[in-house]
């Protein structure tokens, strides 16, 4: 009977039922099986209002959407060009760095490809880079930066795993840099024939680019500096960011008119609502699964044929790759992490390290069919068939996969900033 | 008439969303200024901001329902021919409406309980003032899902209609 309902729910999900409805249905079914009053689902959902870190999610998302509607993406590209444009294959490196930075701020929701890709893709083509390379680069860089503060998935992992978000922000720096540097190196190597740099380095251009971006400059300093130094709590940094971005884009620079503001707010809150409603109902379904001892059964099942940490990590990587191919990062996070944490703990995997592996692998899910979000957005945005987009990302996918394996089997990379000893 | 009603509902939802978001930004930053500059704080502010986040979550989900843009995996539906896809989507709609109606009903019971037991939040305010967003939110989501299903039914019958999505 349970198997049958699970199959029906799976089929409904594959035919396009909203994920929150699937999760809510399974929670309702589980509660009624245990003869618990169904209003418990509402009580669990209401506990969304008991998680202080969640405040950061709507605020950062709104700030990110607003930034992407302003001239900030163009200015960001100009600053990065001034800094990195002198390297061979410079423009490609610019693209990687700018995308990573922007994604961290906009929470990996596909906004990067739309806001930055629209500038970088034509620029790369004009600089006579190979078209397939450009498409692959812009598509795969669109989710780079997921491991840097203040990205939405990092915050959400902290909420779900009940780990201080500051720890995750610190932990993400080195693995995030690894992914970034590996991708940038690949870009340089592929374009080594292209000795002609984008421009020669000029302090004057750096100064001009920085001056143009003078209003945005405090943002990374306040947010990253504030969070990493511990001066601001994450939710405080989010509030300051939202107010500041609202102020500069609407009042100072006037790049976003008041009339467009409600639309931008609605778009950003649509994403927030979509994620949080899944989080709310999965609080209910997770609790009943934990009460029913699902993690222990899972552990018993896995330890039947896995005994050491290495095998466990390898198996987990494979599982997460498959998961990332069918689920988006947010749903996967709230559904799987609570069940995975106790199992990982018994194999001595640090929850912070698990988070890095989880998010880095899920980042690859943006590039794998059938539901790779970046593939669809890039295909739509640049008017290319999905298959072409997919093929163009393969070399980048391979590089990122290698970096994920390194992150998984080198825990110190994620943990060394946490334990300064 | 019905079109204007749909328009009004969408307008009210959007207005509520904008107001709550602006209030959240305002309250959260005021709290920071008070704490860092004046070394004081509003006792009720942290709890109120958390409640606002819950409201944003539900209002955002309502807008996602209205625009038919909830997070989903529709791999199989993509493979079907247009008409078959419409039929399957209608069946899925029925399921979604059922789940949402249950969520609405049981969260209404939850709020009613809080009302009868005179639960309070924020020192002394009735808790149901804040919890009421649950049945309202899920109720509005039922409404939008019904409208979507109706539009698909009409499309299936060869008489497509335009619906308010407020975009």
Image (cartoon, coloured by chain):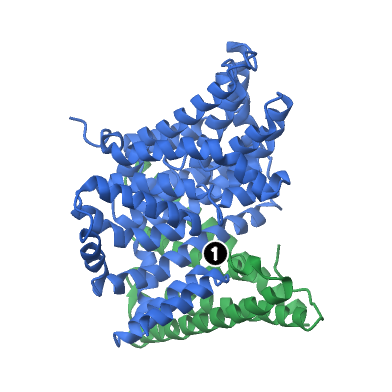
Chain colours: A blue, B green
Residue A354 in percent (x, y) is at 30, 48
Compare residues B6 and B72 and report the one nearer the observer. B72
Local crowd at mark 1 within 10 Å, few (<14), some, or many (≥20)?
many
Question: For this view, does B61 lie left or right of residue A159?
Answer: right
Subunit ID for the residue under disc 1 = B
Task: State whether residue B155 is above or below residue A362.
Answer: below
Residue furthest to the front in view is: A305
Q: Quadrant of the C terminus of chain A?
A: top left
Residue B153 in percent (x, y) is at 72, 82
Task: State whether residue B90 is above or below residue A404.
Answer: below
Question: For this view, does A385 lie left or right of residue A303?
Answer: right
- Residue drawn where x is 39% and y is 68% of the image: A282
Compare residues A231 and A404 and report the one nearer the observer. A404
- Residue drawn where x is 39% and y is 71% of the image: A46
Residue furthest to the right in view is: B159
* Numbered circles on residues, count: 1
Helix, strand or loop at disc 1? loop
- Residue drawn where x is 36% and y is 49% of the image: A317
Compare residues A381 and A240 and report the one nearer the observer. A381
Q: Is residue A249 visible?
A: no
Q: Is residue A7 visible?
A: yes
Q: Quadrant of the N terminus of chain A?
A: bottom left
Residue A248 in percent (x, y) is at 60, 39
Q: State the image quarter where residue A231 is shown.
A: top left
Residue A339 in percent (x, y) is at 30, 62
Which residue corresponds to mark 1? B73
Compare residues A352 and B53 and report the one nearer the observer. A352
């Amino acid at each position: 009977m349970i198997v049958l309902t699970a199959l029906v729910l799976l089929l409904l999900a594959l035919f396009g039922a909203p994920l929150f409805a699937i999760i809510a249905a399974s929670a309702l079914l589980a509660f009624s099986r245990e003869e618990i009053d169904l209003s418990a689902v509402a009580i669990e959902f209401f506990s969304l209002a008991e998680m202080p870190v969640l405040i950061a999610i709507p605020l950062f998302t709104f700030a990110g959407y607003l930034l992407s509607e302003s001239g900030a993406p163009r200015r960001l590209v100009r600053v990065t060009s001034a800094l990195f444009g002198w390297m061979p294959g410079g423009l490609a490196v610019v693209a990687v760095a700018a995308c990573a930075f922007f994604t961290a701020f906009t929470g990996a929701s596909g906004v990067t490809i739309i806001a930055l890709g629209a500038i970088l893709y034509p620029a790369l083509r004009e600089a006579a880079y190979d078209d397939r390379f450009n498409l692959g680069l812009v598509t795969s860089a669109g989710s780079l930066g997921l491991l840097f503060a203040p990205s939405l998935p990092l915050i959400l992992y902290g909420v779900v795993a009940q780990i201080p978000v500051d720890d995750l922000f610190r932990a993400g720096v080195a693995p995030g840099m690894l992914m970034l540097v590996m991708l940038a190196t690949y870009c340089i190597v592929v374009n080594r024939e292209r000795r002609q740099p984008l421009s020669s380095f000029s302090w004057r251009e750096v100064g001009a680019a920085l001056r143009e971006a003078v209003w945005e400059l405090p943002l990374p300093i306040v947010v990253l500096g504030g969070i990493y130094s511990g001066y601001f709590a994450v939710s405080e940094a989010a509030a300051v960011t939202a107010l500041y971005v609202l102020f500069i884009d609407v009042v100072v620079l006037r790049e976003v008119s008041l009339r467009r503001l409600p639309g931008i707010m609605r778009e950003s809150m649509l994403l927030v609502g979509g994620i949080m409603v899944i989080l709310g109902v999965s609080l209910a379904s997770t609790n009943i699964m934990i009460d029913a001892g699902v993690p222990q059964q899972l552990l018993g099942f896995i330890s039947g044929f896995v005994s050491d940490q290495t095998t466990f990590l390898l198996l987990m990587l494979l599982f997460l790759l498959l998961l990332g191919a069918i689920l988006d990062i947010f749903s996967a996070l709230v559904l799987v992490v609570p069940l995975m944490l106790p199992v990982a703990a018994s194999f001595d995997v640090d929850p912070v390290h698990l988070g890095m592996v989880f998010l880095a692998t899920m980042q690859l899910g943006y590039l794998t069919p059938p539901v790779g979000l970046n593939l669809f957005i890039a295909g739509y945005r640049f008017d290319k068939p999905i298959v072409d987009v997919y093929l163009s990302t393969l070399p980048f996918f391979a590089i990122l996969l290698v970096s994920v394996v390194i992150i998984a089997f080198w825990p110190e990379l994620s943990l060394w900033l946490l334990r300064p000893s | 008439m019905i079109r204007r009603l749909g328009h009004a509902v969408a307008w009210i939802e959007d207005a509520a969303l904008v107001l709550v978001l602006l209030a959240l930004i305002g309250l959260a930053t005021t709290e920071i200024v008070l704490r860092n500059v004046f070394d004081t704080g509003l006792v009720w502010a942290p709890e109120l901001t958390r409640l606002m986040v819950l409201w944003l979550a539900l209002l955002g989900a309502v807008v996602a329902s209205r625009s038919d843009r909830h997070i989903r995996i529709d791999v199989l539906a993509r493979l079907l021919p247009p008409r078959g896809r419409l039929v399957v989507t209608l069946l899925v709609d029925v399921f979604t409406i059922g789940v949402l109606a249950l969520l609405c009903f049981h969260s209404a019971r939850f709020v009613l309980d809080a009302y009868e037991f005179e639960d309070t939040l924020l020192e002394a305010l009735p808790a149901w003032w804040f919890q009421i967003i649950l049945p309202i939110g899920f109720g509005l989501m039922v409404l939008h899902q019904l409208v979507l299903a109706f539009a698909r039914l009409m499309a299936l019958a060869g008489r497509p209609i335009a619906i308010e999505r407020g975009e």
